Amino acid sequence: MSDLRALAARAAALRATLREANYRYYVLQDPELSDAEWDRLFHELKRLEETHPELRTPDSPTQRVGAPPQASFAAVRHPHPMLSLDNAFDLAGLEEFEARLKRVLATDEEIAYLAELKIDGLSINLLYEGGVLVWAATRGDGVTGEDVTFNVLGVPGLPQRLPEALPGGGRVPEVLEVRGELYLSRAEFRRINEERAAAGEPPFKNPRNAASGTIRQLDPRVSAGRKLQVFFYGVAEPRALGVRTQSELLDWLAAAGFRTNPLRARARGIAALEPLIARWTALRSTLDYEADGVVVKVDELALHDELGSTARAPRWAVAYKFPAEEVETTLLGVSLGVGRTGKITPVAELEPRLIEGTEVSRATLHNPGFIAALDLRVGDRVMVHKSGGIIPEVIRVLTEARTAELPPYVFPETCPACGEALIEDGANVRCVNLACPAQVLARLSHYASRGAMDIAGLSTKTLQKLLDKGLIRTIPDLYDLTPEQLTPLEGFGERSAQNLVAAIARSKTQPLERLLVALGLPHVGARTAQLLARAFGSLEALQAADTADLAALPEVGETTARAVHDALQQPALRALIGELRARGVGGGAAAPRSDRLKGLTFVLTGTLSEPRDRLKERLEALGARVASSVSKKTSFVVAGEDPGSKLDKARALGVPVLDEAGLAALLAARLGEEALALESS
Ligand SMILES: NC(=O)c1ccc[n+]([C@@H]2O[C@H](COP(=O)([O-])OP(=O)(O)OC[C@H]3O[C@@H](n4cnc5c(N)ncnc54)[C@H](O)[C@@H]3O)[C@@H](O)[C@H]2O)c1
Ligand SMILES: [Zn+2]
């Protein structure tokens, strides 16, 4: 029983996390999870719901596609729903797919498949009436999409009018719904990002994001200036065309003027597809567009009818996802990063390459030992991947490709920023010069960062400018800046100068826990800082504590206790704290509040199991905002029983909706034990 309760809680937590991720991915276009991580969570939820059908909810992300359309576009209802695809991550996954097919079709005969490349762009649905394009729409949530007709008009191979008769004698039906994938080539993606850089705009993260941003442009001139391309792969009712297989369907589309991908192959039985998949995996990095897998479709359309679809995906197709991409490139050089503690991190400077959709030109080399173990030499051809799907890393040197006699890499003996001799410290090397300009900048930038004093407008670039002009040398100097000093600086006006000075002044009242993070005490992250702030209440009390007092706190180990104690005794840090106190910094009361929900806005509606005001207080105490009306900025609507129009508004805007169980799961996922502590208080 309690087992099932634990599983139910896990399922609810997964649903809430995936919903939030979908919102960030499809609506904000600013994902926080890697795709691999999303896939992992999605499959955990799917498995849970399969083994425990009683845990499935109709609104589970496993039963849904994408996210609802945004209000800035006219909504278009797809005559036939647009679905997603089930995934397979290895050959065993494909074999499972085949076994399921044979079971459902009750056959032992080999099934014929058509394999197509899975293009990593965004899906588009076109409606033709009487052979004329009526509208083009994004997938949206699969039922309703966004009308983007004006933005696709110039795309080559996307006909606005269809021929009356086709070469083979076929006819175009009165109503035709055609599906394809819009994408940008790697070259065009680079060009657009260069153009954006020149205009001072932030770059797109990957070609898929860029394509999505282009098609959802409200100004059609912008999209017309970018070379969108398309491959078509399906229609809603293929049988009306008189074709019998997916292969014939693609030929039909090509004959009617729709651009289709020439890379496709038919095979009988999954095993026969394996060599092809190996070939296409190798081909992947040579294509001029991004493909993230191979879509395997049952070729016979009659079998599609028999197999049907789930709420989310057809049963007659599966997307085999390519494994993590390893890309070959050249090591152009090694640069050294100097952290705020003086730790030196070697970084590989690489000839830029797209890896899994993002441009990579630098990769971590961890420490001198890592470079030595790889025997890495400048000029080498190297293999790079994204570790955990996110952080680029050099994994191998292609020593066989070494043509010239490249000299071994010699790790510098002095700090690149200040010239001081570097000191070995375990596996790392360190610059121990506290006045090292790189460390000074890194410390200032850490102090102002979001997780620390959170000073808006005080970017690393601005800090560098202030240091260059001699306006600051140390952290306390920030508090002596005046608007008059800032106004003449490049990039500043009167207004922004005043804003920055005000933001710096506001940071004086940040709670103690933030100041502890900002000071960069060793081993002290957000969680430990909170514990220390709660236990001691003031910097003075913390400075007076000895190692045993610190180690007596739950969760604070001996090592941390000693490191914090020793750091607080260092004359340099004592002096810094003294100067900050003299300027009124750290005046904020040790806040009982947490910021675990910072940045999230909730709207509450309907009857909840606790008074709304109490829930509001609870959420606000965790740093969330609770608003009274729903807008595009709302992160979640929490709906109790008999919810009002706020729920409809949320649905219309694509704002994720949580029930109380979903909220509890979200809190549990975000807060860990902190949530439990709150529950019991
Ligand atoms: N990182 C995140 O937070 C996050 C959040 C949500 C989704 N995702 C990613 O998106 C994926 C799910 O998104 P999805 O539902 O859009 O599915 P999908 O992109 O994995 O696959 C379905 C789509 O593939 C496209 N496609 C391309 N070539 C095709 C072809 N030849 N035949 C048929 N279809 C073809 C179609 O547009 C179809 O809609 C996840 O696997 C994950 O990688 C990531
Ligand atoms: Zn240095």
Image (spheres, grey):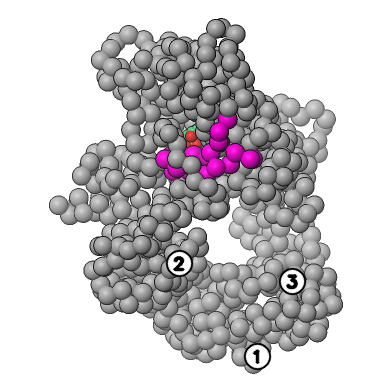
> Of 51 and 361, which appears nearest the observer?
51
Residue 550 at what x, y percent from top left?
Answer: 44, 79
Q: Classify mark 2 as within 8 Å of ligand 1 or not, answering yes or no.
A: no
Residue 670 at what x, y percent from top left?
Answer: 40, 62
- Name the quarter where the C terminus is drawn: bottom left
Residue, x 69% and y 54% (percent of image)?
A: 202
Mark 3 burial class by Cα count in 10 Å: few <14, some 14-19, many 20+: many
Q: Which residue is mark 2?
A: 601
Q: Which residue is mark 1?
A: 583
Please tell me which of labels 2 and 3 falls first in the chain: 3
- Confirm whether residue 181 shows in the render: no
- Farthest left residue? 1
Q: Which residues are magenta?
A: 133-151
Alpha carbons under labels 2 and 1: distance apart: 34 Å
Give SS at disc 1.
loop
Give SS at disc 2.
strand
